[in-house]
Amino acid sequence: MSTAKDLFIIAMDQEPDSPVGQGDLSLALAGAELIDLLGAQVASLDGDRIVPGAATEPHDPLLAEAAAVLTRQVPYERVEDWLWRRGRDLSATYQAALEEDGQLTRGRRGLLPFGSDRLEPADTPVRRRAHGRWEEGEPVLLSLGSAVGIGEAEDEAGADAGEPIAPGSPDGAVTTVLAVVHDAVTELAAVRHRRSIENAAFANLWRGP
């Protein structure tokens, strides 16, 4: 399993009255993928640019897909641009993959309704592993969870929202990715807020005095 799949499962297990936004989750999933690629030395960071590394293909199919679409021309892609490009509809991609693998089941909770039921993580070793990482307070998973509004992850991890901590990253690459994820989610929230104001103003214009 990957950090992204663990994050997706944790997000799916949230209560129905506090769902995780799919746009926020997609950005965080893209960040989680990049962190795993860094850990596998499939990529590295030069400042805020992603430098492709060894041609080794990750065992996880979605991570392999992520590695395959890394930009390999100079100047390399910035982390922020990767999040927005790779993150487009990524939560739906993970949902489909986990459902196909039998990791999701019909239930009362989940991100999206399907008929009268919703999808939720099945009680499998994969789900238990994801929750084990979360309960152990793994800094990367907690910071990604905090970015999408799950729990009080930053307080538990002992970091400020703008300065997420990273486990054993001497060059700060993981910290850089986590910080950009937090910034991207904040930017997305600002875009949503601006659109809601614009839509309200447009509706009032047509409604008239």
Image (spheres, rainbow, N blue to C red):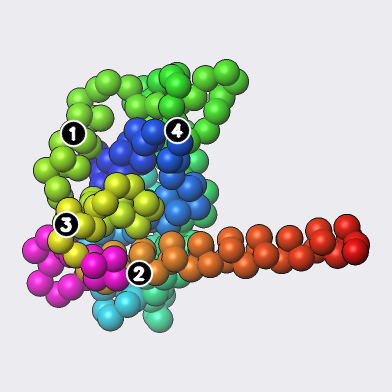
Is residue 60 placed above or below 27 in the rendered structure? above
Spatial CA span between label 1 and label 4: 22 Å
Question: Which residue is tagged 3?
Answer: 157
**Label 1 neighbour load within 10 Å: few <14, some 14-19, many 20+:** some
Return the residue at label 2: 180
Judge from the rendering whether residue 17 lies leftward or rightward of residue 169; answer left or right. Answer: right
- Amino acid type, label 4: Pro
Residue 169 forms part of the magenta stretch = yes
Mark 3 touches mark 1? (CB < 8 Å): no
Q: Is residue 104 magenta?
A: no
Q: Which residue is mark 4?
A: 16
The residue where tag 1 is placed is 129
Q: Say which label, 4 or 3, has the lower sequence index.
A: 4
Give the Cα separation between the discs numbered 3 and 1.
Answer: 19 Å
Pinpoint residue 37: horizontal percent, then vertical percent.
Answer: 26, 57
**Horizontally, is 135 left or right of 43 in the view?**
left
What is the three-letter code of the residue carrying label 1?
A: Arg
Give the Cα distance between marks 4 and 2: 28 Å
